[in-house]
Image: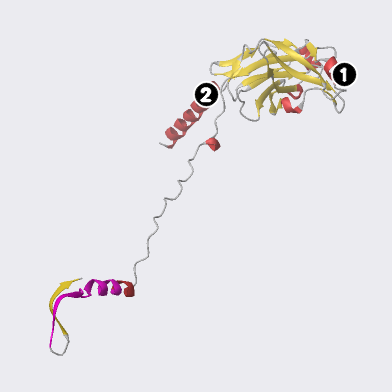
Amino acid sequence: MKQFVLRFGIVVVLAGVSLGQTAQTALPTDPGMYFEAAGGLTKIIGQIAEFKRSGSALVSHATVGIKSQKENIQLLGPHAETVVSSRPVFFFVPAKQEAEAGVNAGDLILIRLEEKPERRQFEIAAHGAWRSSSGISLTHQVQLFRSEVKSGIYKIVPAAALSRGEYALYLSRGEGMAPYVYDFSAQDAPTSSSSTFFPASAPPAPVAKSEPLPSTTETAGVENLSKKKPGYQCTEYTVDRLGLKNCTKRAIK
């Protein structure tokens, strides 16, 4: 009986391990950028970020540098072809030339793109009277968590859920190689339990003002007035021998 239970337990454990392995997403082997989807991994086709456009130098000079001159990298089209959820999981495998140059997940920067009617763009430099900067501004960067799940295979996850919009993973590939951009759209707005609406408590109902009750002396006075005897007026009278008037007919006042 003990041997049967032991063998049955081993079978169950092995079955659980097998199921766990099949449920786990298979890691990519070919170089490139991938995102995790319901059916497995989907590859994102990147593009070289080489088209740069500077802002108006005339405006910058006219304002004596108050209006800074910016340099942007632009991507054609208002939206990316790749669409992901608000909590995407990416896998990155550097190409051989990139790996030899020391490129890894630490060289990836997640950027929130500025959206225009026919293009998307992000700033890489700015020059003005009070500031001069080069590189991607921190205000446009989104924090990433990076890990190496296997030698040469990296997992990249945004630190927080992405809001609806246009994004890109920017890869600086070292000297002699132009930077690469893996652009995508996040379509699912994140939800948070902290945003649950709780209606404010209703204001207290107005309390009717009660009139003070009359005092006992006031009620006694009212009762005395109601009990007062009616008055009489003499309408006819006679005079006796002494000259005194005697009322013979009275009327109520």
For image coordinates 86% across by 19% down, the residue present is: 62
Dot 1 falls on a residue whose secondary structure is: helix
> Residue 32: where, in percent of width, then height?
69, 13
Image-based side of 244 in relation to 143, left or right: left
Secondary structure of residue under mark 2: helix
Where, by quadrant of the figure, is residue 154 drawn? top right
- Quarter of the image that includes the N terminus: top left
Closest to the observer, 118 or 125:
118
Residue 14 drawn above or below residue 206 = above
Q: Position of residue 205 (x, y in %)?
A: 42, 50
Circle 2 sits on which residue? 18
Q: Amino acid at mark 1?
A: His
Proximity of marks 1 and 2: CB atoms separated by less than 8 Å: no
- Is 202 left or right of 59, judged from the image as shown? left
Q: Which residue is mark 1?
A: 61
Q: Which of the two residues, 79 or 182, is positioned nearer the viewer here?
A: 79
Q: Earlier in the sequence, mark 1 or mark 2?
A: 2
Q: Which residues are magenta?
A: 220-240
Q: Looking at the figure, which quarter contains the C terminus?
A: bottom left
The answer to whether residue 250 is visible is: yes
Distance of label 1 from label 2 (alpha carbons): 68 Å
Q: Residue drawn 54% across and 30% down?
A: 191
